[in-house]
Structures are given as C-alpha cells and as structure tokens.
C-alpha cells in the first residue's frame, strides 16, 4: 500500500500545490513567499489525502 500511496502522492501533491498557487494568485497576492507557502501547504496536505485514497483503493 505504501507504493500505491507514493504513486498517488506524486499526482495529488502537484494538483493540490497547483490549486493553492492559483488560488493565491487569483486572490491578488504576488509575493514569492505566499506563492511558495501555498505550494508547500498543498504538498503537505497531499500526504494524508494520498494515504486515505490509497487505503480506499487497496480495500
């Protein structure tokens, strides 16, 4: 299941990080710290999401 979670993480993290960056840019914040923060937050949020999706797929 760990291998499946790793594969899913590579897909989910880019999606969530990209969504976070787009949301920050649409909100009008254009400093590199807020853009980087949104990308990091999306990557961190993807960890439990990918584990949950892998568990649901595996079971």
Image (cartoon, rainbow, N blue to C red):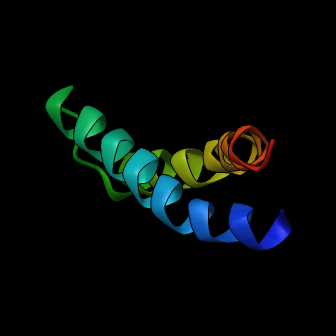
State the image quarter where residue 2 is shown.
bottom right
Residue placed most toward the observer, 4 or 21: 4
Instruction: Give x and y (percent) for residue 38.
Output: 45, 45
Residue placed most toward the observer, 57 or 35: 57
Q: Image check: 45 left or right of 36?
A: right
Residue drawn at (29%, 36%), measured in percent from left and top? 24
Residue drawn at (22%, 46%), measured in percent from left and top? 30
> Against 5, is 26 above or below?
above
> Against 57, is 13 above or below?
below
Residue placed most toward the observer, 39 or 14: 14
Q: Image check: 37 left or right of 14?
A: right
Q: How many marks?
A: 0
Instruction: Give x and y (percent) for residue 44.
Output: 67, 50
Quadrant in which the N terminus appears: bottom right
Quadrant in which the C terminus appears: top right
Instruction: Give x and y (percent) for residue 17.
Output: 43, 51
State the image quarter where residue 14 is shown.
bottom left
Instruction: Give x and y (percent) for residue 23.
Output: 27, 33
State the image quarter where residue 26 is shown.
top left
Residue drawn at (38%, 51%), measured in percent from left and top? 15
């Amino acid at each position: 299941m760990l291998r499946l979670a790793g594969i899913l993480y590579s897909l989910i993290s880019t999606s969530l990080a990209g969504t976070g960056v787009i949301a920050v840019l649409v909100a009008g914040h254009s400093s590199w710290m807020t853009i980087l923060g949104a990308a990091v937050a999306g990557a961190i949020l993807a960890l439990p999401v990918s584990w949950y999706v892998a568990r649901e797929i595996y079971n």
